[in-house]
Amino acid sequence: MAEINHRRKSKTKPSATTTTTTTTTTSDDGRHDGFPDECDPQVWASFDQTFRQVQSVLDRNRVLIQQVNENHQSRIPSNMVDNVALIQELNGNISKVVSMYSDFSSDFSSGFNNHKSRNGKRGSSNPDA
């Protein structure tokens, strides 16, 4: 089996970086273990779109958090008042991300089950299926 390592650096502070390592295990023929060898392109396109939307909201949240921190550190009363609206937007965005991941989970489960049923329940643990 081959292992593919992906490393991504993300800046958390100007003087610090965080490294995230993701390991994907593939079989010798290049397929991901445990996944069907055929994938529905529409399902994967939908997943890609969902992840892009989630990333967009998370990027916006990062900007909001930075602004809230700057406003708080300034100790200027009007900036502190502005933080109320920024924190409300941040809270709403967190709810959006939760909803998107919930929808994604349902879509993934449905897509996987549909693919499995279209392919004669290949890989089913039930021999009578």
Image: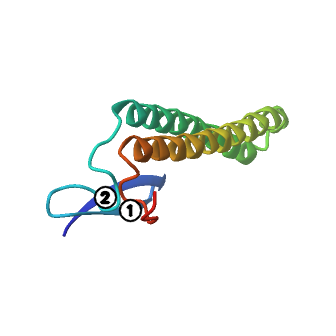
Front-most of 86 and 69? Answer: 86
Q: Position of residue 50 (x, y in %)?
A: 50, 35
Front-most of 38 and 51? Answer: 38
- The kind of residue tagged 2 is Arg
Q: Are marks 1 and 2 in contact (CB under 8 Å)?
A: yes
Q: Residue at x 23, y 55 (%)?
A: 31
| Element under disc 1 | strand
Q: Position of residue 4 (x, y in %)?
A: 23, 61
Quadrant location of the N terminus in the rendered image: bottom left
Front-most of 68 and 118? Answer: 118
Q: Residue at x 39, y 40 (%)?
A: 118
Q: Residue at x 53, y 47 (%)?
A: 109
Which corner quadrant of the image does residue 81 belong to?
A: top right
CA distance separating discs 1 and 2: 7 Å
* Image disc number at residue 7: 2
Which corner quadrant of the image does residue 47 belong to?
A: top left
Q: Position of residue 76 (x, y in %)?
A: 80, 38
Does residue 100 lie above or below 17 as drawn?
Answer: above
Does residue 31 lie above or below 97 as drawn?
Answer: below
Is 57 placed left or right of 116 in the picture?
right
Does residue 18 lie above or below 113 as drawn?
Answer: below
The 10 Å Cα crowd at callout 2, few under 14, some 14 to 19, many 20 or more, is few
Q: Residue at x 82, y 37 (%)?
A: 84
Specify whether residue 13 is in view.
no
Specify whether residue 1 is in view.
yes
- The kind of residue tagged 1 is Thr
* Image disc number at residue 19: 1
